[in-house]
Amino acid sequence: MADDMVVGRVTEVASGVRRVLAGNPSVMTGPGTNTYLIGGNEVAVIDPGPDDLEVHLDAVAEAGAGRIRWILVTHTHPDHAPGAAGLKARTGAAVLGYDERDGFVPDETIGDDWELTAGDFRLRALHTPGHASNHLCYRLDDDRLLFSGDHIMSGSTVVIAPPDGDMAAYLAALDRVRGIDLDAIAPGHGPFIDEPAPVIEQYITHRLARERAVREALTAAGTATIPEIVEAVYTDVPEALHPIARFSVWAHLRKLADEGTARATEPQDADATWSAVDFPRETSA
């Protein structure tokens, strides 16, 4: 369906689900952060956004019309969680998230399979580490709708940035989400996704293809640094974005090191030199 992204506009994206787009567009956030309001008589908010956009928090509070009871965050990155304190000050709602970190202080910590049942909706949390170790998605059970935060975004892949970002965990969490019955995804950035299955498959296919390309580039070079691998692999990405791509390459290399097919003297060091370990390149028949 058509989904116009307009900052500050309250848009109904599904039955009982409204979105307010924050005015923080960037190369990392796309059009901006999506804040969602779920429910009618009692309202839960997911991802209030950054803390320096008072007009956004005012718009979310106004849309809640005095009925916001819960403020949930998918993870504690600065474009998703910091606004929780300001929204709590406006509404008195309880703040919930996976843990206390990055200046985010929840009233209650929640984890995998935590459930919120209100008068007209039921939300279930899924721990989906990878982009961040404290990342949660939320499934609106009756509507088979997933609020995906930065686990899955619309129109873009996700950056996995070590040391907290973990590629093996991310791929495992993607595989878990693939097995859940979903009709739609409400992402943390970008338009509503009303055909989730092919998007999830493309995410997995893309990441595995990047991983193979990283291994092949490393094997061909003998030894290489992360910037050198990015230059060899990310030929389809503008050079201005290569510094961002370095994070995902580092995450792939750390995963390969754990699996024994790559090594570096200091895998935790973004400036390390890497080498391949007995990786046979595929040949076409």
Image (cartoon, helix red, strand yellow):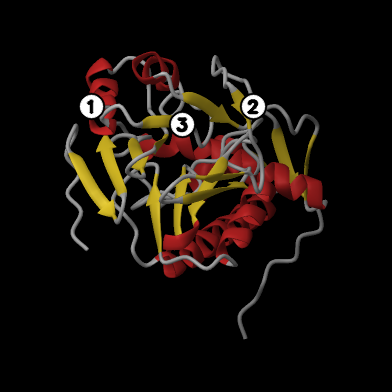
In front of the other: 75 or 256: 75
Q: SS class of the residue under badge 2? A: loop
Residue 258 visible in the shown view:
yes
Q: SS class of the residue under badge 3? A: strand
Q: Where is residue 32 shown, x and y percent of the image?
A: 29, 34
Q: Is residue 235 left or right of residue 135?
A: left
Query: Which quadrant of the figure has residue 269?
Result: top right
Q: Relative to 1, does residue 90 appear above or below in the rendering?
A: above
CB atoms of marks 2 and 1 within 8 Å: no
In front of the other: 245 or 111: 111
Q: Which residue is mark 2?
A: 99
First-in-chain label (2 vs 1): 1
How many neighbours does mark 2 have within 10 angstroms: few (below 14), some (14-19), or many (20 or more)? some
First-in-chain label (3 vs 2): 3
- Outermost residue on the bottom side: it is 285
Q: Is residue 260 left or right of residue 191?
A: right
What residue is at 57 percent from the left and 31 percent from the top? 97
Q: Amino acid at mark 1?
A: Glu
Number of numbered discs overlaid on the protein picture: 3
How many neighbours does mark 3 have within 10 angstroms: few (below 14), some (14-19), or many (20 or more)? many
Q: Where is residue 38 shown, x and y percent of the image?
A: 37, 44
Cα gap from disc 3 to disc 2, whole angstroms: 16 Å
Q: Where is residue 93 shown, x and y percent of the image?
A: 44, 24
Q: Amino acid at mark 2?
A: Asp
Which mark, residue 70?
3
In front of the other: 143 or 199: 143
Q: Relative to 196, does residue 19 appear above or below in the rendering?
A: above
Which mark, residue 62?
1
Q: Relative to 175, does residue 28 appear above or below in the rendering?
A: above
Q: Amino acid at mark 3?
A: Trp
